[in-house]
Amino acid sequence: MRASFAQTVVTTLTLGLAACATAPGGPEYSELGLRTLDASGLEIQRACVPLPLLPGGAVEEDLALSPGLGAHVHTEQEFAEVALSGTNDPASARVTVPRTTLLSGYSRTLDVTTTNGAAYSVVLLSPCVPPLPVDGG
């Protein structure tokens, strides 16, 4: 009985490890990063929004980038779309990026002025730079 149990354990572990060694099918994980810089170049906000892996999935994020400046981010499996709000020119503050572009590396800077006159740069990038650490002090 003991040998049978040991063999079962070894077989289960071997099959489990073999399954882990197999590359998964399906799309590669991707995400879009947003970095917000004020007029002096100081980074004031950072966020990462994933693209869903399953067909038909969608991620919606509303981000407060700074006082008076926001972003609505909509991602689906094949693209990411960013629409900035609170800017003087909303039409030029809307960007759509295909997933294939994000996977190969992407960076674009949108220089915007808010309706209250503040200037910011919003950097869209992939791979995403992790969010800023929270100050515990």
Image (cartoon, grey):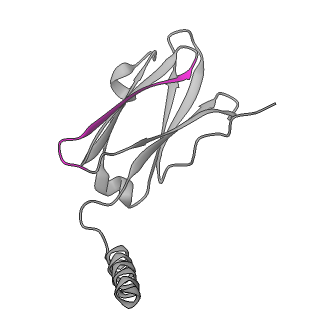
Q: Name which residue lies at 50% across and 25% down.
A: 112
> Height in image: 41 above or below 31?
above
Q: Residue furthest bottom?
A: 3
What x and y, as percent, mark residue 87?
45, 17
Residue 64 sits inside the magenta stretch: yes
Please give the name of the residue rendered at 58% of the width and 15% of the height, measured from the top-left corner. 67
**What type of secondary structure mainly makes up the magenta span?**
strand
Residue at 30 percent of width and 46 percent of height:
52
Residue found at the far left of this picture: 56
Q: Which percent across, then down, holds residue 62?
A: 42, 24
The residue stretch that appears in magenta: 54-66
Q: As displayed, is residue 80 above or below residue 68?
A: below
Give the percent coordinates (x, y) of residue 114: 52, 16
Q: Quadrant of residue 38?
A: top right
In the depicted view, which residue is nearer to us: 37 or 133?
133
Measured as percent of width and height from the top left, residue 63 is found at: 47, 25
